[in-house]
Image: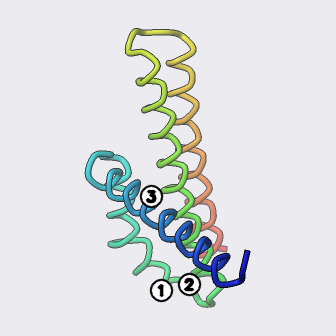
Amino acid sequence: MTLGRFLAARTRRLAMAVRYTLAGLGHALRTERPFQEEALCLVLIVIPGAVWLGTTGVERALMVGSWLLVLVVELLNAAVERTVDRIGLERHELSGRAKDLGSAAVGVAIVLALVVWGLIVFG
């Protein structure tokens, strides 16, 4: 394989990855209420607050990054919920636990973000 063909193949794969990423983000922004609320919080509160309260670039990055982690975990939680629902809509103890664990992961990510913010603002 020549370098040109190699780069063309990699570029196509990257373009498809970007397309899938944007499709997933678009779907989450259209249909996932918790993700919508957390993304709005990022834009309206977290980014301006980090710029105002963070004194260094590292502090600002930690403040914004900790909330971006909340969004990542929320996306994974939504994926778990969709997968469980795809398998079957009947009530099952393991399905409920899987959804509860996903929700708990989001809660832990939010606590982490609050701790990061607290340590930076009050520490």
Q: Write down the residue under mark 3.
A: 20
The quadrant of the rendering that contains the C terminus is bottom right
* x and y percentages locating residue 69 in the rendered image: 57, 59
Contact between marks 1 and 2 (CB within 8 A): the answer is yes
Is 106 located above or below residue 67 in the figure? above
Q: Write down the residue under mark 2.
A: 54
* x and y percentages locating residue 24 in the rendered image: 40, 54
State the separation of the CA atoms marked 2 and 3.
33 Å
Relative depth, front residue between 12 and 108: 12
Check disc 1: other Cα within 10 Å, few if <14, some if 14-19, many if 20+: some
Q: Write down the residue under mark 1.
A: 51
Relative depth, front residue between 41 and 30: 30
In the displayed structure, does residue 47 sit left or right of residue 117? Answer: left
- State which tag comes first along the sequence, 2 or 3: 3
Is 61 located above or below residue 69 in the figure? below
State the separation of the CA atoms marked 1 and 2.
6 Å
Describe the element under mark 3 as helix, strand or loop.
helix
Identify residue type, mark 1. Answer: Val
Identify residue type, mark 3. Answer: Tyr
* x and y percentages locating residue 7 in the rendered image: 64, 80
- Please identify the residue farthest to the bottom as the structure is shown: 56
Which residue appears at 54% of the width and 10% of the height?
93
* x and y percentages locating residue 47 in the rendered image: 43, 77
The quadrant of the rendering that contains the N terminus is bottom right
Which residue appears at 48% of the width and 49% of the height?
75
- Please identify the residue farthest to the front as the structure is shown: 1
Relative depth, front residue between 18 and 118: 18
